[in-house]
Each structure stands twice: as C-alpha cells, then as structure tokens.
C-alpha cells in the first residue's frame, strides 16, 4: 500500500521543482487533475470514509486523552498497513492508484488553506513583545538539540552511514529540532490551556522559533535554487522579496482600509473576504512560478492579514469548519497512509542481511534530539528562576510536541531525498508517538487550576477588616453590562474611610487569531472618545467618569481579555488572584428586553463560563441579573431600594455583609427579610450555622441600623418552599435590587420542593426563582462566598 502512495503529496513535490513520480499508465485525465465520471463519486466516498473513520476512532481514543491528530494518523496507518493479503486487497480497491492523485491534490489543497488559516490567526507583534524568557526558550529549543545531534552524526553516525544518508539524518534532526507555531497553538487549544500563564509563554517561544524557521527554510530554498540554476537564483530572490514587500505595503494597508470601511459591530462584507481568499490561493501559484515553495505565498498573505475582529474573525469563520474538519483529516490521513507498519519491522539490510545501520542511527539521532530538547527547555527557565521545576518540565513538553507541520515535512522530504520506506516508517512512528505521549504527560503534570486549589487565604467581604479597601473584579461581555455594573458599584458608596478598587475586565471571544491577548488599558495612550469609538474605549470612558465622581475613594483599572470562551474563566480567576480581589461580579447569561417582559439573548457559553468561575474562583462571586434595563440616578428624590432575602448559611451571610456596605449610602434604603420555619423558634436553634446567622442578625433586629443608617428588618414565617416562593413573588416588585445567597444544592424546610423545579441550578434555589421567566423585579444579585480548602 505504501509503495502506491507516492502521489499523495505530488502537488508539494511539483511545487519544489522536483518531477513527481508519474505512472506511465496513469490516464490522461488523472495526470491533468481532471475527474472522470466515476472518479468524482470515488473521491467523495474516500473523503467521507476518512472523516467518519477519524470521528469514530477519536470518539474512542479521545476518552483516554489521546489527541485528535493521533486519531487521524491511526486511521491512515490502518488503511495502509498490510495486515494480510485480503485486507491489502480491500484497501487497494478503496484507494486505488489512479484515485490517489485526486485525493492527494485535495488534501494538500487543505494544507495550503491550513497555512493561510494559521497565518491569519498569528499576531506577529508577539515576537517584538516577547519577554526575555520566551526569547531564550525559543532560541535554546532549536540550537541545543540541533548542535547536540549534529555532533552525534559527525563523531558517531558517520562511521556507519554514507554521505547521502548522513545528509538525510541532518534533515531529520532539523525537523525534530524545530517547534512549529501551528502545532503549539493546536496542542494548547486542545488541552484548554491556551491562555494560561504557561500556555502564553509556550506560544511566545514557539513564535520566536517559527520566525527562525521561516528564515532557515528561505535560505535552504534559495540554496537549492542556486545549485539548480545559479544565473536565475538572484532573480528568483528579488522576485520573492518584491512579493513580500507587495504584500506588506500594498495588500496589508488595503486590509486595514477594509476594516475602516466596516461599521463597528457589523460584519465584514463577504465580497472582501472572498477577495482575500482568492488572493491567498493566487499567491500560492505566484510563489511557485517565481521558484519558491507554493506554501510560502498563502502563509505570508495570512501573516499580513490583521488578526482578530473584524477581518480575521470573518475569514476564520468562513473556512474554519471546512479546513479543520474536512480537509485536514484528509491531509493527515493520506500522509499517514504512506506508512506501512510492516516496513517499520524491517531492520535488516537488504544487501548483506545484517542490521540496517541507517535505521539504527536514525533512531539514535531522534532520541538524542528529543532528550537534548527536553533537558535544554527544562533547565533554561528553571536555572533563570523564571518558574519552578514542575512548570519548567511542563513547558519543555509543550516545546517538544510534534504535529501536522512535521508530518508534512517528512512526507515532502521522502519525495525529495528518496528516503527508504523503513526509515520513513520509523520517523513517522516516532512522530506519532511523540504527538500522543507528550500531551498525555502534560495533562498529568500541569494543572492550571492548582493555583486556585488549596487556597486557605480568606478573600471575601465578610472577613474584611473595618475601613479596609474592597477590591472588586467586574466582568463585561456586552455594552448593556456597563450601566448595571456601574449602578452596583455606585450603590456600594465608596468613601475615603471605606474605599473601593474596581478592576473592570472586558471579555471578548478569541476568533480569528491564534494567541490570546490581555490588554491593560492603563498602559495604553488615552484616545479621544467619539461616536465611532470601540466598546473598549467607551468602557474606559464610562468607568473613568465613575472614578471622577468618587475621586479619592474609588480607583478603577480596566482590562480587555481576548481568549477562547471555554478558557475565559482562567483569565478571570488569575486576575482576581493577582489583584487580591474579594468579589467577582459576573453578568447573567440571559438578556431581557427593555421592559423586562421578553428574552432577547440566551448565551449558553456565558452561562457555562459563570458556572466555571463559581467552581474555581479564589474569592467570592456574584452574578448580576438585570431584568429592566435602567440607569439609576442616586439622589434623595430617587432612593435606591435594596432587599436582602435571608434564609441562612455562609452565602446569605456574605450577601448580608455586602448589603450592609450599601446601607452606608445615604441614597440607599435597605430591607432585610429573614425567613424562618413556622414550626421552629429561634431559641431552639442549636446548629453552628444557625447560631452564626442569629448572632449576625441580632444587631440589625435590635437596633434597626447599620452604623448610622436605618435598616428595615422583617421576619417571615413559612411552612415550606411553595409558601416561600409566594412571599418572594409578592416582594420582588417593591425593590430596585434584591440580594440573595447562592446556597447551591442545599435544601432546607424553607425551600423544600423548589430544588426539583430549578431551571438554573448555578444560581441556587432563590436565585433561580428570581431569575425565572415569570418572576418580576428589576435586578437580582446572587452571591456565593469564597470556597476554600477548609470547606472540604
């Protein structure tokens, strides 16, 4: 099967000016890339078979933590390996020789789009913003393994192999030494650590190595052209430079012009997107004609495309599914189909019958390269005291992971250098093992949540000392989150005696770029705000106005995080941890109409984010639910009425302490409603939680005050959950804000019968009741007190 697979990447071979291996008996329409009537259904069947097989294998192996890339490779190995004559005959019928030209052409077309796709997502400015640690790591990850392995070839392997084999060993060393940026991004995204501290450092280091990779490949390609045609080499180089300058100074400014022509919040016109895609495909032909790799052009055009919204995002959305789920499985599978595992077992020299020294030395240099890379990438950050040993080892595993770029590289090298089948099988098996084992080790070794787990430090409102600064992290997803968050912060009434520090984090989903981005707006130059300003600028302006209102008592810091939706919780929790925040404020995932009677948006991704933050947060968390979209004006004429619904427990106590801070605001009217079982007297309470609740409420009950502020205290006797719900529904429309504790999963006599009807369990029983569609009210704030290791 492997001997019949030489045309799988014939397109790449033709692009490198090396004559492809053409079967003289191949039909003329196959040689010219045309599909006869019976070939089109066969091609469609092959693509469907590859896709379905990949999904089936990945659904099984994915549960074991094995990456999708490995599943694709395994499918290719299964189709290619000669297990027995009957199996080989069936596979030959499915992937007969003439059809492989068509399948190979489609799959390599997918790889061209993949490189363009990767280029669009890449932020080249990261190279210039890279820290010393990332630069050192990127440099050492290439130099150390390459130098060590070349020394082994020079002093040891050269005794057993000839000159051409030594040259191939050097190429193998070069491919195993590099750390391609697309591989690292795919790995970190699959492991959901793309925007972790370790993931960011790994991406920066990989992008540094990618920069050197492009330079090295360009030099090697130019050298090859000089050898083949020295007279036209300089003309070819000049044409390549002109192409890069054309893209950088003509096409890239044109793309920024497209962005300027697109109104804020509106998608980029499809006509512009299609023009850029056509330009990327044409650039492949152009760079091929000037003598460079056909893959060079699309990657350069991708790098020149502004990453992120709106243009990069629009392009990625157009081709993401088609590239990642249709064409890339075809490319990876067809590359793996060139390997027959029976060749891997062939360690005998066919000439003298002895051991195949080329195979042995290939294995030696692969082991030396991998070990040198692991040791160097572990030792460098640990020696410089950039990170502890465990994280250093995790980072070295990231830098050692192989993937699709090396797979394509070895497939290309086999055609160019004529690498023996058994050696090719060896390097491909080593590559697949690396791509399988490294992520599994990394998953076991590195847990990005460890910095939150085992936290014994109390970071909540209840345990704050008097006259201590309250630190709040407010998260913003949509523009309508800004007024409701400002209302809440203004109600807390910052003073010089009780100051407030608000960190405001705008969260944007990562689409159209590979690297997550975290922006501190205090470090950026102030821009003039106008009607065309971005949401970030409007956010900064709104909270700066709030800061001026409470000058000397309120400090506001604004940030923007661009990261995958499933990883946003890490940015939130990390910022809360580093800024010593006591409370995280999250917006509810549901948005009501302005009158509060109908639902406009139901964002399940935001709901999942809120749940993850509540599970992992290193401090207290609150979800702010606003049913009526209003901006309150705090004044004696328009007092802000707040009600605390108190059933009991640590979350309710946290909610009460937050409300007591609001009570100091002269424009806030606070009411505390305590629910008590009708069958139990307060004097009968003997459990510790109940005693704490009574002790905290006694002062309010006796004095009707918090400090000098008047507080209305009400006790309600109820029999069960339904009666509690009736009382609450009668109260909700009387207040501007209702504050409740989360108390998730806890059912008391006061809430019996309500838990089973819960629609949003992440809000707790009362929070879910107040957020339900038929509930009234204006705003609800559900608070969960910090979960620590002491809670078990």
Image (spheres, grey):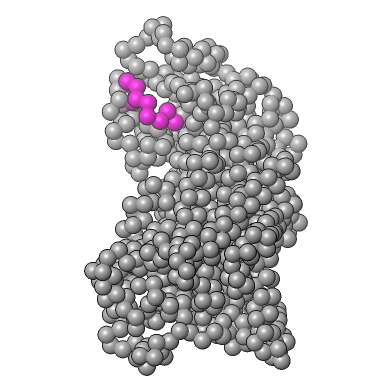
- The spot of residue 227 in percent (x, y) is 67, 84
Q: Kindly report the secondary structure that dominates the magenta region of the rendered protein.
A: loop
Q: Nearer the viewer, residue 244 or 423?
A: 423
The residue positioned 60% from the left and 51% from the top of the image is: 371
- The spot of residue 387 in percent (x, y) is 67, 41
Magenta stretch contains residue 745: yes
Outermost residue toward the front in this view? 352
Outermost residue toward the bottom in this view? 28
Q: Can the viewer see residue 654 in this picture?
A: yes
Outermost residue toward the left in this view? 86
Q: Nearer the viewer, residue 284 or 372?
A: 372
- The spot of residue 245 in percent (x, y) is 70, 80
Q: Can the viewer see residue 146 in this picture?
A: no
The residue positioned 70% from the left and 37% from the top of the image is: 554
Q: How many marks?
A: 0
The residue positioned 38% from the left and 60% from the top of the image is: 74
The quarter of the picture where the N terminus appears is: bottom left
The range drawn in magenta is 742-751
Q: Nearer the viewer, residue 429 or 768?
A: 429
Magenta stretch contains residue 418: no
- The spot of residue 713 in percent (x, y) is 48, 20
Give left or right: position of 80 versus 168: left
Examine the image and state in which quarter residue 361 appears.
bottom right
The residue positioned 53% from the left and 41% from the top of the image is: 445
Compared with residue 30, is residue 395 higher up or lower down, i.e. above or below? above
Compared with residue 678, is residue 262 higher up or lower down, i.e. above or below? below
Give left or right: position of 538 versus 61: right
Examine the image and state in which quarter residue 85 appears.
bottom left
Examine the image and state in which quarter residue 80 appears.
bottom left
Q: Nearer the viewer, residue 247 or 696?
A: 247
């Amino acid at each position: 099967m492997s001997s019949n697979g030489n045309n799988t990447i014939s397109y790449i071979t033709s692009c490198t000016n090396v004559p492809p291996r053409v079967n003289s008996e191949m039909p003329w329409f196959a040689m010219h890339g045309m599909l006869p009537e019976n070939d089109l259904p066969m091609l469609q069947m092959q693509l469907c078979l590859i896709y379905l097989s990949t999904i089936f294998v990945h659904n099984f192996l994915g549960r074991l933590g094995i990456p999708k890339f490995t599943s694709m490779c395994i499918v290719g190995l299964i189709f290619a390996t000669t297990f027995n004559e009957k199996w080989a005959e069936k596979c030959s019928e499915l992937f007969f020789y003439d059809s492989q030209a068509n399948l190979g052409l489609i799959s390599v077309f997918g790889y061209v789009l993949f490189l363009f796709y990767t280029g669009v997502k890449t932020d080249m400015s990261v190279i210039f913003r890279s820290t010393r640690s990332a630069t050192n790591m990127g440099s050492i990850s290439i130099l150390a393994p390459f130098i060590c392995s070349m020394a082994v070839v020079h002093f040891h392997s050269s005794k057993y192999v000839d000159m051409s084999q030594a040259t191939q060993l050097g190429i193998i060393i070069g491919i195993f030494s590099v750390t391609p940026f697309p591989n690292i991004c795919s790995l970190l995204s699959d492991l959901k650590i793309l925007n972790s501290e370790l993931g960011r450092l790994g991406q920066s280091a990989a992008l540094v190595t990618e920069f050197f990779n492009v330079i090295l490949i360009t030099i090697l390609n130019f050298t090859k052209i000089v050898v083949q045609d020295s007279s036209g080499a300089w003309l070819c180089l000049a044409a390549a430079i002109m192409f890069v300058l054309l893209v950088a100074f003509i096409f890239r400014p044109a793309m920024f012009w497209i962005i300027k022509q697109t109104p804020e919040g509106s998608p980029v016109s499809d006509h512009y997107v299609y023009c850029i895609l056509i330009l990327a495909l044409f650039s492949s032909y152009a760079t091929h004609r000037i003598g460079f790799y056909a893959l060079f052009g699309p990657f350069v055009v991708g790098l020149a495309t502004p990453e992120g919204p709106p243009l990069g995002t629009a392009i990625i959305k157009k081709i993401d599914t088609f590239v990642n789920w249709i064409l890339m499985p075809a490319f990876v599978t067809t590359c793996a189909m060139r390997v027959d595992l029976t060749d891997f077992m062939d360690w005998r020299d066919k000439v003298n019958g002895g051991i195949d020294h080329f195979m042995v030395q290939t294995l030696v240099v692969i082991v030396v390269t991998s070990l040198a890379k692991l040791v160097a990438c572990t030792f460098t950050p640990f020696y410089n005291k950039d990170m502890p040993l465990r994280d250093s080892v995790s980072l070295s595993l990231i830098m050692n992971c192989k993937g699709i770029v090396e797979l394509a590289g070895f497939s290309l090298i086999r055609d160019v250098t004529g690498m023996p089948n058994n050696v090719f099988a060896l390097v491909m098996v080593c590559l697949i093992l690396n791509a399988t084992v490294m992520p599994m080790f990394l998953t076991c070794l590195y847990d990005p949540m460890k910095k939150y787990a085992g936290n014994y430090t109390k970071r909540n409102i209840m345990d704050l000392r008097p006259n201590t600064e309250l630190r709040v992290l407010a998260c913003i997803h949509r523009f309508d989150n800004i007024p409701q968050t400002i209302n809440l912060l203004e109600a807390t009434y910052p003073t010089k005696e009780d100051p407030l520090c608000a960190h405001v984090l705008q969260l944007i989903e990562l689409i159209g770029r590979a690297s997550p981005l975290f922006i501190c707006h205090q470090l950026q130059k102030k821009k003039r705000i106008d009607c065309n300003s971005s949401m970030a600028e409007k956010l900064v302006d709104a909270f700066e106005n709030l800061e001026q209102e409470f000058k000397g008592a309120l400090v506001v810091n604004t940030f923007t995080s661009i990261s995958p939706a499933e990883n946003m919780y890490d940015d939130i929790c990390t910022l809360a941890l580093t800024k010593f925040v006591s409370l995280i404020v999250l917006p509810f995932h549901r948005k009501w109409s302005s009158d509060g009677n109908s639902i406009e948006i139901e964002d399940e991704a935001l709901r999942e984010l809120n749940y993850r933050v509540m599970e992992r947060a290193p401090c207290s968390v609150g979800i702010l639910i606003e049913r009526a979209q209003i901006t309150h004006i705090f004044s004696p004429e328009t007092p802000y009425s707040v009600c605390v619904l108190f059933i009991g427990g640590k979350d309710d106590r946290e909610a009460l302490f937050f409300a007591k801070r609001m009570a100091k605001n002269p424009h806030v009217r606070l009411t505390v409603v305590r629910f008590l079982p009708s069958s139990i007297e307060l004097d009968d309470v003997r459990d510790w939680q109940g005693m704490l609740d009574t002790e905290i409420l006694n002062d309010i009950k006796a004095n009707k005050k918090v400090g000098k502020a008047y507080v209305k205290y009400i006790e309600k006797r109820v029999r069960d959950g339904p009666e509690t719900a009736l009382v609450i529904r009668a109260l909700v429309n009387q207040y501007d804000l209702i504050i409740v504790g989360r108390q998730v999963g806890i059912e008391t006599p006061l809430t019996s019968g309500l838990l089973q009807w819960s629609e949003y369990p992440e809000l707790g029983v009362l929070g879910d009741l107040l957020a339900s569609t038929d509930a009234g009210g204006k705003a609800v704030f559900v608070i969960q007190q910090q979960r620590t290791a002491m809670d078990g």
